[in-house]
Amino acid sequence: MLTIFLAILPIFLLILTGFSLRRSFIKEDIFWKNLEKLTYYLLFSALFIVQISKADFNGTG
């Protein structure tokens, strides 16, 4: 049970951080729209490339 909790804790902390930033510091909608585009097109793509580069393509399995 502790393992599951520790696995999902960073997800909830990230959501809570974004929520608190939205409520208190960064309130402009244009900033969040541009941040979503950056995350989707650049960072998410970079995550795929890094994970594919680490993959083992030996054909065994």
Image (cartoon, helix red, strand yellow):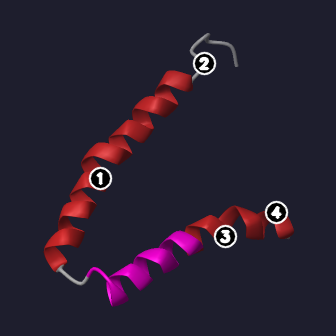
Which of the two labelled residues, at mark 4 and mark 3, occupies the earlier sequence position? 4
| Residue displayed at 50% across by 80% down | 16
Query: Which residue is outermost to the right?
Result: 1
Which dot marks residue 56? Answer: 2
User: How far from the left and from the top, in percent, is residue 7?
Assistant: 71, 62
Helix or strand or loop: what does disc 2 sit on? loop
Whether residue 23 is in magenta: the answer is yes
User: How far from the left and from the top, in percent, is residue 55?
Assistant: 56, 24
Closest to the camera, between mark 2 and mark 3, is: 3
3 over 38 or under it: above or below: below
| Residue displayed at 25% across by 62% down | 35
Q: Which residue is mark 4?
A: 3
Q: Which residue is mark 1?
A: 40
Which of the two labelled residues, at mark 2 and mark 4, occupies the earlier sequence position? 4
Q: Which residue is mark 3?
A: 9
Please state which of residues 48 and 38 is positioned toward the viewer in this rendering: 38
Query: Which residue is outermost to the top?
Result: 58
Q: Label 3 crowding class (10 Å Cα cut-off): few <14, some 14-19, many 20+?
A: few
Tell me the kind of residue under disc 1: Tyr
Q: Quadrant of residue 4?
A: bottom right
Which of the two labelled residues, at mark 3 and mark 1, occupies the earlier sequence position? 3
Disc 4 + disc 1, Cβ < 8 Å: no
Q: Which residues are magenta?
A: 13-26
**How far apart are labels 2 and 1 at the CA level?**
26 Å
| Residue displayed at 14% across by 72% down | 30
Please state which of residues 49 and 24 is positioned toward the viewer in this rendering: 24
